Amino acid sequence: MMADDPQQDTHARSGAPRRRVLAAAAALAPVLAAAHTAPARALPAAADHGHRDGPVRPVRTALSDWADVAKALGRGGDMKRDLMYHTGLPRRDLSVISQGVLVKPELALGSHVSFVRYADGSTMTMGDLVVTEQELQPFLDVLQQHRIAVTALHKHLLSQMPDIWWVHVHAHGHDPVTVARGLRAAFDRTGTPPPQRPAPSGHTLDTAGIDAALGVKGTYDDGVYKSLFIRRETITEGGMALPPGLGSTTAFNWQPLGGNRVAISGDVAMVAEEVQNVLAALRRAKTQLVELHNHGLRDEPRLFFTHFWAVGDGVTLARGLRPAVDATNAAPAGG
């Protein structure tokens, strides 16, 4: 048939038999008509949960509302802004070195998941999970078996030993306990340890100088100082309004190394128009760029994140990082 089409065969005779072409067209006509009139497949109901009058809003909850989720996860959590039930799972079982620095779990090895209840009774789960390269593929398999979506697979550190990966996850539905059980099954395929008390830090840090340079009051978490900024816009994910800070946080984690020296692992949240200015500012601040990626799949406005790393004087680094923050539409999260 293709030999009779002069567009397909330049050596075809100019007097190609028209009857053969017409017969083929007649044979295809019923098929084409059926394809044209067949109803399009509907998108899954979960594709977009927004309403005509705006996105679905999160509702306030209390710690007691999440007791069954905590039981399924095998550990307790805490509330963030009365909207997010947050559980941290630091990888204290790992001894990770990046560019000569022994990385504390709270600097860059802290798995965490958050659950948010919405006005329509549904619950959204989002998290960033830390696994070794040997754990990665079985871990992903279990997440898929439990219908927990993987939205990003990336790095936070350079030249780390052993090799570590970070996995962003997402789930949305009306059964958060089942999601928690799926997460627990995935964590059980890793060396993620049970909860334990953190070891005290032996170093001090000029936190007042860092706060003044960045314009935000930070907090300590397991010996690591954290400075947080939150996007000013309302961010939605599949029509659901995210609580401030969920999946849209600029975070600087400072690990004291002694003598005012720090290792910093940072993550900046940006819209597309801000990306290049932020990357340039981070390089001027003498930081090393690690990753440029997304956390979500259907966020609006679309957010990009860049991880970076630096070692040096804490206050000097903070002063250098201020222009990167100022290049974004973010506000201090406060202490």
Image (cartoon, rainbow, N blue to C red):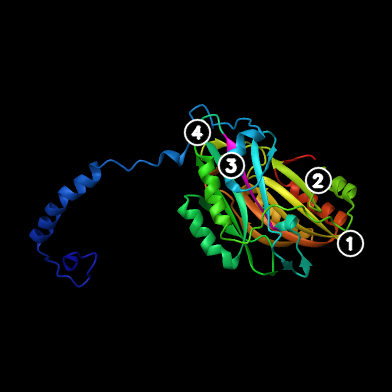
Return the disc, 1 or 3, that comes first in the chain's sequence: 3
- In the image, what residue type sits under mark 4? Gly
Classed neighbour count for the residue bearing mark 1: other residues with Cα under 10 Å, few (<14), some (14–19), many (≥20): few
Residue at point 40%, 41% (across, down): 44
The mark closer to the camera, 4 or 1, is 1
Quadrant of the snapshot with the C terminus: top right
Instruction: Please say if the residues under marks 2 and 4 sit with CB atoms less than 8 Å apart.
Output: no
Percent position of residue 153, x then y: 57, 58
Q: Nearer the viewer, residue 324 or 219?
A: 219
- In the image, what residue type sits under mark 2? Thr
Return the disc, 4 or 1, that comes first in the chain's sequence: 4
Q: Which residue is mark 4?
A: 50
The magenta stretch spans which residues? 109-117
Percent position of residue 240, x then y: 54, 36
Return the disc, 2 or 4, that comes first in the chain's sequence: 4
Specify whether 106 is left or right of 114. Answer: right
105 in relation to 174, above or below: below
Classed neighbour count for the residue bearing mark 3: other residues with Cα under 10 Å, few (<14), some (14–19), many (≥20): many
How far is mark 2 from mark 4, CA to CA? 35 Å
Q: Nearer the viewer, residue 171 or 46?
A: 171
Return the disc, 1 or 2, that comes first in the chain's sequence: 2
Percent position of residue 325, x then y: 75, 47
Specify whether 141 is left or right of 219. Answer: left
Q: Residue furthest bottom?
A: 11
Q: Mark number for residue 258?
A: 1
- In the image, what residue type sits under mark 3? Val
Q: Which residue is mark 2?
A: 219
Q: Which residue is mark 3?
A: 69
Q: Nearer the viewer, residue 225 or 69?
A: 69
Classed neighbour count for the residue bearing mark 4: other residues with Cα under 10 Å, few (<14), some (14–19), many (≥20): some
